[in-house]
Image: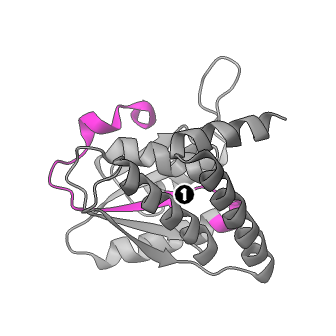
Amino acid sequence: MLITEDFNNNMNSHCLEMIVIPTGSLDSDKKRVSKAMDYYASKEQKPQLIVVGNLQKDESGRLIENSQQYAIYKRLRQEYGLKPSNLRVEGYSNNTLENFIYLSQKIKNRNVNDLKISTNFTHYLRFKLFEKQAKKEGLLSKKIKLTPLYTSESFQEFIRGIFAYVQDYLILKKTGSLENAKLKKQKKEVI
């Protein structure tokens, strides 16, 4: 199945720009897809697209076809006519930190120099926080830049986003690395 194909084996080697669509709430997903596709449609040289977020699977390990991530993939294919060669799904991450870590692994040693993140302001701030740390740790090339494709954000989303940023900042400061921060967040989510 295309969604589970190895991203690295199929990535276009001359891709310099990539649009990242992180999953979140249903409302934010709609905004992120629309913003990403507006940008995509404006480009003559079409960038790669990647949806980052955990693919939901049933007890037997099969993809749940009515899951949110699958719905995004389906919408991109059906509504926007994307071909499988233009779209990838990361499929493992459960939060913004993991989105960033797994995305970094997917693009490592690839000719990507511009990541367009389709999301709201406060979520983008968290991506920038992780970008800085990843470059410091050598997990992300210093030539790669993150640029936002901003979506709207309600006041409640803004407040939640600021709290999430502070929490991620403190965890990162306390643990000293992205991988240690990931492990600490996973322990908190289990509790």
* Image mark count: 1
Write the residue at 37% across / 31% down: 5
Residue 16 counted in the magenta span? yes
Region in magenta: 1-28
Q: Position of residue 74 (x, y in %)?
A: 52, 50
Q: Nearer the viewer, residue 137 or 42?
A: 137
Residue 133 in the image: above or below residue 38: above
171 lies left or right of 13: right
Residue most extreme to the top: 60
Q: Nearer the viewer, residue 159 or 47?
A: 159
Q: Residues within 10 Å of mark 1 (few under 14, many from 20)?
A: many
Residue 122 in the image: above or below residue 141: below
Give the residue pinned by disc 1: 22
Write the residue at 44% across / 31% down: 4
154 lies left or right of 132: right
Q: Position of residue 141 (x, y in %)?
A: 28, 54
Q: Nearer the viewer, residue 85 or 173?
A: 173
Would you identify the image quadrant in which residue 48 lies? bottom left
Write the residue at 43% across / 64% down: 80
